[in-house]
Every structure is written in C-alpha cells, then in structure tokens.
Amino acid sequence: MKRYWSRLLALVLVVAIGLMGCSGSPDGLSGDYRQDTLNVVNTLRHTLDIPDNSPEQSAAQAEARQQINSFAARYQRDSSVAGLNSFTTMRTALNSLAGHYSSYPNRPVPQKLKNRLEQEFKQVEAALMRGA
C-alpha cells in the first residue's frame, strides 16, 4: 500500500510540474526582442519617474530589478540579438541601474544617472526603429 501511494504522489508531481512548464512565460516577457525591450524601457522609466518618498517606490524598484534579471537571462545568450546596437546599449543601461540598486538599495537614483539612462533609452529606441 505504501508503494502505491508513493508512486501516485510521484505521478501527480510529474503531471503538476509538466503542466506548469507548459504555461505562459512567468517572467512577463513575450520572446519578441523588440517588444520586450520597449516594455522594459517603459517599466524602468516609470520606476525612475516615481518620487523618492513615494510608498510605491520599493514595489516599483523590485519590479524593475525583476525585469532587469528576466531580460538579461532571456537575451544574454541569444546570438541573434547579442550583436545588435540596441542590445549592447540596453545592457549598459541595465547594468548601471542594477549596479546602483545592488550597491545603494536605500538611496534614490542620482539625477546624473537618471539623465544618462534616459539618453541610453532614447538610443535604444532609435536603434530599434532602425532595426539594429
């Protein structure tokens, strides 16, 4: 009887894991590089525009970190986008912001970094429009 229950439990776990693996992307990325890049840029712009004393800032920062990690994990090893100008510029911006969040988690993003990130976001959008 004990063998029966352990096999049944194993079967249920395999089915549950298999069904969860077949569901949509848990990171919110669609797999379309251009659209995913624009979504990440918009999320990061929204996060940077939130006032420093706002109660929603910590939640937005956590979402931004999640988006950065998901984007990097999905496209870092994709050879079809690794050489694109938009990707290298985007990675530079993501690394800068992620570095600030990990080094100074309780400090607001300096205006100088915000200005540089906005410039890089504009470059990424221009490169995406060109198809690069």
Image (tube, rainbow, N blue to C red):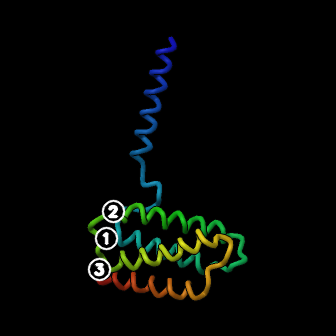
Q: Are marks 1 and 3 in contact (CB under 8 Å)?
A: no
Q: Residue at 51% x, 77% y: name it.
A: 96
First in sequence: mark 1 vs mark 3 = 1
Which residue is label 1 attached to?
82
Q: Which of the two marks, 2 or 3, is nearer to us in this view?
A: 2
- In percent of width and height, residue 19 lies at 42, 40
Which residue is label 3 attached to?
132
- In percent of width and height, residue 38 lies at 42, 75
- In percent of width and height, residue 108 lies at 66, 78
- In percent of width and height, residue 71 lies at 43, 65
Q: How many residues crowd mark 3 within 10 Å: few (<14), some (14–19), many (20+)?
A: some
Specify the amino acid type for callout 3. Ala
Q: Secondary structure at mark 1?
A: helix
Specify the amino acid type for callout 2. Arg
Q: CA distance from mark 2 to mark 1?
A: 7 Å
Which residue is label 2 attached to?
77
Q: Residue at 71% x, 75% y: name it.
A: 54
Specify the amino acid type for callout 1. Ala
Q: How many residues crowd mark 2 within 10 Å: few (<14), some (14–19), many (20+)?
A: few
Image: 108 above or below 9: below
Q: Are marks 2 and 1 in contact (CB under 8 Å)?
A: yes
**Would you identify the image quadrant in which residue 7 lies?**
top left
Q: CA distance from mark 1 to mark 3?
A: 11 Å
**Would you identify the image quadrant in which residue 101 lies?**
bottom right
Q: Secondary structure at mark 2?
A: loop
Q: Residue at 45% x, 71% y: name it.
A: 39
